[in-house]
Image (tube, grey):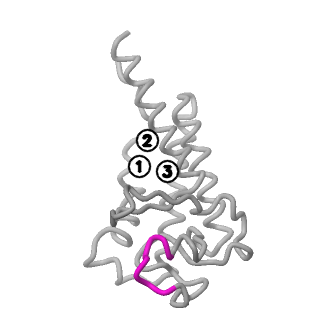
Amino acid sequence: MFPSIKLSWLVPVAFVPQLFTFFLPATQNYWSDGIVAFGLIASLILLLVVALVNFNQWGFRVIALGLALNLLVIAFNGGFMPINPENASRLYPNVSPDAWEFGQRLADSKDTVIPEAATRLRYLSDRFFVALAPVSTWRIVFSVGDVLIAAGIFLWFWQMRESVFE
């Protein structure tokens, strides 16, 4: 039997603000940065509630920690995930580093460009960079919280796999 997820219906509800503000081109530029920041924080809080209600499962313990760290750094930096100018330049190599306006939202993302020294809780920010290959356009910057969320999801699937074969 699969491990049950309490309040699982809340996960798609929590994703809705992110869908409209980050992923749908028709609506992502429609909202003010204040509304987007509020939606991001609300989304993270709802996901954290789901993780805490399911805290008896190891995967959700790790997910909850990752969500809490991301929520903390986002809340302390104006509602968006801070990214330093160097990583912003890595994500957008065709944009001059002088073009980054500190404290402003990075393109249509959840990030805001803040100098490393001015970032609150900077070790929790989007600071790790990965490119698929040197010539690839696929680039990603992620945080410690993102790693924990991914690890927690992996652990939950692993736990689910074990319960299927019992």
Which one is in front, 131 or 82? 131
At horizontal 69% and vertical 64% (from top left) the residue drawn is 122
What amino acid is found at the position of numbered circle 3 in the picture? Leu
Image location (x, y in percent) of residue 135: 34, 64
Question: Residue 47's mark?
Answer: 3
**Number of numbered callouts drawn:** 3
How packed is label 1: few (under 14 Cα within 10 Å), some, or many (20 or more)? some
What amino acid is found at the position of numbered circle 1 in the picture? Leu
Q: How far apart in space, not on screen, are marks 1 and 2 (Cα)? A: 6 Å
**In the structure shown, which secondary structural element does the residue marked by tag 1 occupy?**
helix
Q: Is residue 146 above or below residue 17?
A: above
Residue beneath disc 2: 7
Residue beneath disc 1: 10
Which one is in front, 77 or 55? 77
How packed is label 3: few (under 14 Cα within 10 Å), some, or many (20 or more)? many
How packed is label 2: few (under 14 Cα within 10 Å), some, or many (20 or more)? some
Identify the mark nearer the N-term, 3 or 1.
1
Q: Is residue 148 above or below residue 80?
A: above
Image location (x, y in percent) of residue 88: 51, 74
What amino acid is found at the position of numbered circle 2 in the picture? Leu
Please state, as top left, top right, bottom left or bottom right, where the C terminus lies in the image: top left
Report the side of 19 relative to 80 (left or right).
Answer: left
Q: Which residues are magenta?
A: 89-96
Identify the mark nearer the N-term, 3 or 2.
2
Which one is in front, 104 or 14? 104
